[in-house]
Amino acid sequence: MTTVDEGVGGALSAQELVDLLRNAIIRGELVPKQRLVEADLADEYGASRGNVRVALSELSVEGLVERVQNRGARVRAVSVEEALEITEVRAALEALCARKAAERISDAESEELRGLAKEMEEAVERGDRESYSACNQRLHAKIIAVSAQKTAAATIQRLRGQAVRFQFQLARQPGRPHVSLPQHLAIIDAVCRHDPNGAAEAMRLHLESVADAIRATNS
Amino acid sequence: MTTVDEGVGGALSAQELVDLLRNAIIRGELVPKQRLVEADLADEYGASRGNVRVALSELSVEGLVERVQNRGARVRAVSVEEALEITEVRAALEALCARKAAERISDAESEELRGLAKEMEEAVERGDRESYSACNQRLHAKIIAVSAQKTAAATIQRLRGQAVRFQFQLARQPGRPHVSLPQHLAIIDAVCRHDPNGAAEAMRLHLESVADAIRATNS
DNA sequence: GTTGACGAAATTGTTAGCAATATCGTCAGC
DNA sequence: GCTGACGATATTGCTAACAATTTCGTCAAC
């Protein structure tokens, strides 16, 4: 079940392996602190040890894997303190993106965001966590896309990968949607009104609240 | 001259190679768009091709090297537009660090920063570019250190490496120190006065001005 | 019972060689 | 003279095997 078959029988390339392992870590199939023995991974994924090695090197630069000289690799465990730091950095970067998005957004994109706002309101109203969480991700992704900031986007994505465990934990919290919905609506409103400062501030407040929730949950 | 000897005769490990190559790129010994042929690098640095390969993989994740499937690696060339994006991201992150630094700075550290301010004023007064540039780097590094934000620090450092070419260009600009000195002094003053908002805003304005200078120079 | 030395097993680090792919020069055909 | 096919060369992608290091179990000494 956890084993990944070799598909059509071809061996995996180094780059394919990086993607597979990254997803496995982000999806939680490989848990924090779990040892990543090169030979085992090579068997499991049907790749050569050399490629596994390269993949682990790259993931260690990305911050998902921790390597110690002569002692192998393991899935990096992100502490609560670190998750808070990451959230603060994300706050700064997503606020930047929100500002840029408010400057550049087109009418069609505005329409799309307002539609998303309606979807979120309805999802909360009928208590559909699944749908709300999906909208949440789409909202953040859309704002980053509209901002057209490639550097910020890449950085945010990397950091998201590192802190995904805490995001997940948060999405399952009981009262959470009722707290975050008005924040999300405020962000959408400011961006659609072409209010850069308002959008940045609304985004900053939202992620500040996320940080508070992480702090409150893990204490 | 450009060739690096093997030192005491030992072959270089993969990790040593990463550091050597990173420095070579940042110091400009390997110029943008320059092809990085694995076999050549292996000869030049006295390492095996496998290790060169791993090093190039890691540097490509760091954004210093560009790799194309089956067509090798080259030093990544950062465009002006990208340098501006990078500077904006740095502005957001260093503003965050300045805010945190203002919250946490100790009296001893304050003293150190004020000493640095005096050094910078004197360097500008006697037209010592070399010394001013060194102080500039020390200032940014110190604020990041005081802020104790590891995630932000790592991100900033990575981005700095990518845009180093533009920073260098800027430091050589004639009137530049007279423009940036008051900004630097304002940052130091706000941080030492424990004024988080003021420090963040001063840092943001400073890097905004850096962005303007990059824009003006490359047009 | 605890401590420390020794050695086997497990695991990582490195290298050399083979296979696959792209690049470039050459030359025939138009 | 220009175009496109062909083959040689250069270069990357990958794998298997070897070397070095760490880890862990065993056992003797205290």
Image (tube, coloured by chain):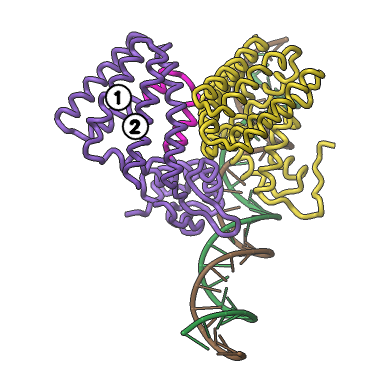
Chain colours: A purple, B yellow, C green, D brown
Please report, as a chain letter, where disc 1 is located. Answer: A
In x, y percent, where is residue D6?
Answer: 64, 31
Residue on which the image places disc 2:
A209
Which span is picked out in magenta? Answer: A141-161
In x, y percent, where is residue B3?
Answer: 81, 40
Is residue B93 in sight in this rendering? no
Same subunit: marks 2 and 1: yes
Please report, as a chain letter, where disc 2 is located. Answer: A
Residue at the image point whose x is 57% and y is 35% from the top: B105
Residue on which the image places disc 1:
A183
Q: Is residue A157 magenta?
A: yes
The amino acid type found where label 2 is placed reads Ser
Relative side of B44 to B160, left or right: right
In x, y percent, where is residue C12?
Answer: 57, 58
Near-viewer residue (A144 or B105): B105
Is residue A27 in sight in this rendering? yes
Relative side of A104 to B87, left or right: left
